Image (cartoon, rainbow, N blue to C red):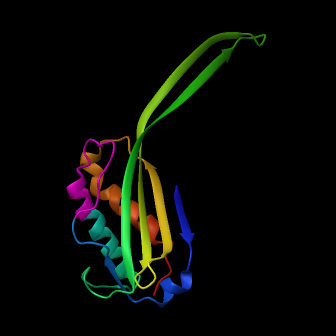
Amino acid sequence: MNRVRRQNIAAVQQASTVSFIQEGAIVRTVPEVPGFPAQQADSEIREAIRANLAAKGYDFLPSNGSADLLIGYSIGAREESDQYIEAYRGRFGQINHISTREDNYIEGSLVIDLIDAESGQVVWSGWVERDIRSPLRDRRSEVISEAVRAIVTELPAR
């Protein structure tokens, strides 16, 4: 599920330069997601954000530069559980058999905020939530790339 909150779209459209809030790793996941090491995920998220924002026409500056917009992002994970109850009815409507099934999985989220460097106000925010139950070790880069693309697609081009 993708969501976007546009607080000050004019500030986003007028901006031409962006930089990350800080250069060091800022990703931490709680609970730890197997196959999703935070250090590697951080560099992959940054690279995906850079590529997608560059495609939208934004120029990157080092974090100590004077960019128009600052980029902040965070990831999260939580354990989820869906329960399904199925009732099988007989010929005359009486319940003959009931079965229950529980589906446990991890739901991950990625949030990207654009912050006006001058005012410190969030001017645009986008996020995505996804079921990440399949083994991420083999698909981590693909999942990150898809999530960032889904979020940045909603951002106006320069």
Residue 132 location, quadrant: top left
Extreme-front residue of the structure: 119
Residue at 28% in and 61% down:
26
Q: How many marks?
A: 0
> Residue 52: x, y in percent?
36, 74
> Residue 21: x, y in percent?
32, 73
Residue at 55% in and 80% down:
8
Magenta extent: 25-43
Front-most of residues 71 and 129: 71
> Image height check: is 101 above or below 43?
above
> Residue 41: x, y in percent?
26, 57
Residue at 40% in and 89% down:
16
Asked if residue 99 lies left or right of residue 152, the reply is: right
> Image height check: is 66 above or below 136?
below
Question: Does the magenta portion include 85?
Answer: no
Question: Does the magenta portion include 40?
Answer: yes
Front-most of residues 6 and 49: 6
Residue 63 location, quadrant: bottom left
> Image height check: is 140 above or below 43?
above
Asked if residue 87 lies left or right of residue 146, the reply is: right
Quarter of the image that includes the C terminus: bottom left
What secondary structure prevails in the magenta region?
loop
Front-most of residues 69 and 136: 69
